Image (cartoon, rainbow, N blue to C red):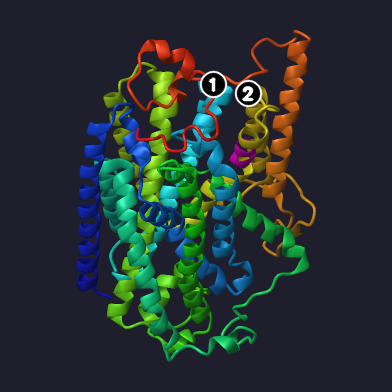
Amino acid sequence: MAVNWLGLLSMGVFYLIVLGTGLWASRKSKREEKKCTGNRSEVTMVGGRDLNIWVSIFTMTATWVGGGYILGNAEVIYDPTRGLAWAVGPFATFLNLIVGGLFFIKPVRVKNYVTLMDLFQEKYGSTVTAILFIPSFFADIFWVACVLGALGGTVSVILDISSPLAVAVSAAVAVVYTLMGGLYSVAYTDVIQLSFMLLGLWFCVPFVLSSPSSAYLTETAVTKLYQEPWLGKLELADIGRWIDDVLILVLGGVCYQAFYQRVLATATVAQAQITCYVAAGLCIILGIPSLLIGAVAASTDWNQTTFGVPSPYEQGKAGIILPIALQYLCPPIISLVGVGALAAAVMSSIDSALLSAASQFARNIYKSIIHKKASEETILIVVKVSIVLIGVIGAVLAMATSSVHLFWILSGDVMYSVMCAQVMCVFFLPQRVNQYGACTGLVVGLLLRALVGEPLLGIPDLLPLPGDKIREDGLRVRLFPFRTAIMLITTGTIVLVSRLAVYLSEKRLLSGNVHRPVHCELLRPIHKDVDENDGLNKEQPHSPGSNEEVGKC
């Protein structure tokens, strides 16, 4: 198949629109920096805390509805071993944003934090925070690699260009506009990208549904025609794995800085909560097209299409079934609209991960440990250099392997298994935990996850679990919800070791402060010019309503 030049032209136009929007937003960012009397770096990281509510809704939705979300929904429902019963993405993402809005926004918003790691830094100090930041930092890098890999596979199917080229170009575009305007560029380009996704995916659905090569969905939902029914089934023995899949998205999602970057960029707690609730509904709406396309693919006689046999599933291409369906079940022009929507989904996730990882590194590592007296200009330079490096590393990883699922495991799985317990403790049990418990919990979580193993990473499964099944090829199938179990064990470890540390300290067998949080100079929000005599007043904790309307840097 020859290179699809019309498709390349349409992709080029889309990227130019995104870059133009990013350039316009960067000018807004520079205007805000000039008005800023406090930390200029906060304009880059949280946009001056004055995002319009509609922009905040769009950027929150676009961040969660990425390439992995779109392609993953279609893959799961098309996979004859899973089906709709296992397509938990839309439902779990909806719950994630509702839970985040109800329980996680106010603690960070009323104190005007800038990053999620600010909580850890206030509680444990800079050194422990730097250790806890490592899993989060790599999770963002693997998130970038995951969505870039998804785009590479999509573009290679429809446009017939090499996957590495598509990855490199997309990464370069995302890095450039994120560099230009920070959160403003990311947020306003998300508006364009979400519009492309919403209109593009729903525009393609009628053409996919009317394909003459596909049977009626109502028939194939419960009847085995070309493969197992796409409704799927959930056996009693599989309940544990299903719960694990749901909780990875529901609770694992609140461990990402990208979530907090958006709620911290709003003007008030109420606006942040409304943003989450509306975005939750939009995530459902944007998940339906990929589910329908996956169901149609499961109802298609591929021998009647130019794809031929064996089917995509038999060729191991279930992960890119959505672009395959767009390519072979839609007219050529329509498939280009679909690939534009997918490119928009990927770009909206990449920029979020780039900025979130760079912000945390510059603020919580560089400023707090490496160079405590760094100026605002230096911090901004560190943010920009970090964005470039993270983008390059993510692109190289995406080019090194075609397995999107591999990077998803490295990002979402590890964040839930290891970091979720840390986040829960610092949010809801701050008086019962300390740095000794946090460090021990991190080691225990990583050790248990390594012992459980992961075939895709070549890590042997050394720890047998209840309900394990051995397949004919000798691989162990885990039916026990081990990720949730690791998270709960890690939580218990953090609390118990923290209590033990307090006991030993009281007996004077352990030195160091284990009773009260460590307050950091960095975490004092700067809203106006003050003299040094105001320092004592700023040490007082913020009352829940005092910062509701504060936050213009």
Q: Main secondary structure of the magenta part?
A: helix
Image mark for residue 125: 1
Residue behind mark 2: 435
Write down the quadrant of residue 157 in the picture: bottom left
**Is label 2 in a helix, a strand or a loop?**
helix
Image mark for residue 332: none
In percent of width and height, residue 52 lies at 35, 50
Can residue 457 be seen in this snapshot? no
The amino acid type, in three-letter code, at marker 2 is Gln
Foreground of the two, 267 or 62: 267
Q: Are marks 1 and 2 in contact (CB under 8 Å)?
A: yes
Marks 1/2: CA–CA distance: 8 Å
The amino acid type, in three-letter code, at marker 1 is Gly
**At x 28% / y 31%, what residue is drawn?**
36
The vertical placement of 426 against 170, above or below, is above
Foreground of the two, 379 or 442: 379
Q: Is residue 421 magenta?
A: yes
Range covered by the magenta-colored residues: 419-424
